[in-house]
Amino acid sequence: MELQWIDDFLALCHTRNFTRAAENRCTTQSAYSRRIQRLEEWLGSSLFYRESRPVGLTPAGEEFLVRAVRLREDIFDARRAVLSASSHFKKNLRIYTTNTLAGSFLSTWLIENRLENYSLIVASIAGCVEAIKRKHADLALIPHFGTQSDFIGLQAEAVGDDCLTLVTGQTQKRAVVLNKNRLCGPLMVYTPGTTYGARIAAMLDAHHIQIIESPVCESASAEALLAQVKAGLGAAWIPGILLEGNAVKRCAVPAFCDIPYKIFLIKAQRES
């Protein structure tokens, strides 16, 4: 199993087209197809219905999709955790959070709570929760789109509110607009398997909205997408905590396109 194969698999799940997936992975279609075949050989099962248009997932493919997302997150989270554990810095607290919160909300929260002498580990949302459950972290700050009941067995407290908003740059030449149920214009999206991407997809499905054009860019990083929004390359759903002071504006779309969420502080349940 290679990490490259997982990224290849997720690209095809997103595009449902071998040609577009190969382009997104910066390789030829033949080389890309061989890599998908090697993954299927390694797993011992076909993952895609190649004869359908768009390409469909087999039952085995549906099963692997859930696990592939988690595998990818676990690999990168493991690397971050190992790097942190190898530090010689004497610390009292191990704090896990996401990249977006680490670069925005976290600093103010640390000052307000007068915390110091800590080790900060940036991980995926799932990685942060898992670190708390395994007692590898003292506390974690994560964006969360559900309710406090999702944190059974953990201490959870909402410490902030935010919203994913579809924004565009001030110099963007062509607007992103919603025409009936068709979202048209240069749009940038989150990588398949990301929490933000899943929530946006759920909102679009709930309102029967279709993205008409191929995305300009795909990334797991809200910060990377924001930089390109500011450059006028397209529109994207960006967390509100990143928008303050940035030269962007909300796209002219209905209010239901905004996706609110809360920022939770989670800790392991105290032992009685």
Image: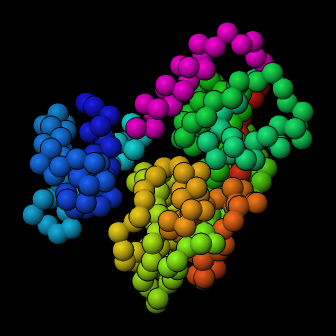
Would residue 40 be visible to someone looking at this image? no
Residue 64 is drawn in which quadrant? Answer: top left
- Who is closer to the viewer here, 213 or 143? 213
Q: Is residue 202 left or right of residue 92?
A: left
Q: Is residue 7 magenta?
A: no
Residue 232 is drawn in which quadrant? Answer: bottom right
Q: Residue 118, relative to residue 46: is it above or below?
A: above
Q: Is residue 239 left or right of residue 209?
A: right
The colour style of the image is rainbow
Q: Quadrant of the N terminus?
A: top left
The x, y position of residue 21, in whole percent, is: 26, 55
> Which residue is pictured at 22% across the width and 62% down the height?
17
- Who is closer to the viewer here, 114 or 148? 114
> Which residue is pictured at 54% across the width and 51% down the height?
224
Q: Residue 87, relative to residue 233: is it above or below?
A: above
Q: Which residues are magenta?
A: 72-92
Residue 245 is drawn in which quadrant? Answer: bottom right
Q: Is residue 77 magenta?
A: yes
> Which residue is pictured at 62% across the width and 23% down the height?
136
Question: What secondary structure is the magenta-colored segment mainly?
Answer: helix
Would residue 128 be visible to someone looking at this image? yes
Q: Residue 225, relative to residue 258: is it above or below?
A: above
